[in-house]
Amino acid sequence: MRANDIPAGVAALARCRAILGGTHDAFRPLWDGFSDRRRCVLLGLAGRRGLYSGRRWCDLPGDVRADVRRAVCELRDVLNDLPAGV
């Protein structure tokens, strides 16, 4: 694929998603690449049990995905507020 073909490819993917009803989820490749241990940590932060750790992101219930996203955002905010050198 040439560099100028990339916008056309992105547009084609957007049309496919519109037809199939799917959406892009930036967290999916991260979750799917994490180990079960890391997934358990994120689920724990979200107040969820680790029984979901063996599932792919798209196989998690929507409320679990929302809780994990919320917990990750809250953790990021807490860590960003820490002073340097702590």
Image (spheres, rainbow, N blue to C red):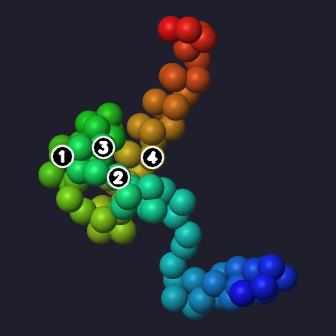
Give the alpha-carbon distance from disc 3 to disc 4, as whole Å. 14 Å
Instruction: Name the N-terminal-most of marks 4 and 1.
Output: 1
Work out whether residue 64 or residue 8 is closer to the camera in this orientation and state it: 8
Q: Identify the amino acid type marked 4.
A: Arg
* 82 over 37 or under it: above or below: above
Q: Earlier in the sequence, mark 4 or mark 2?
A: 2
Please name the residue shown 56% across and 8% down the image.
85
Asked if residue 71 can be seen in this view, the reply is yes
Q: Which mark is residue 69?
A: 4
Residue matched to label 2: 34
Dot 2 and dot 3 residues touching (CB under 8 Å): yes
- Residue 15: percent from left, percent from top: 66, 88
Amino acid type at mark 1:
Gly
Looking at the picture, tell me which residue is in the foreground, 1 or 34.
Answer: 1
At which x and y percent is residue 44? 26, 36
Q: Write down the residue under mark 1.
A: 50
Q: Are marks 2 and 1 in contact (CB under 8 Å)?
A: no
Toward the right, the furthest residue is 4
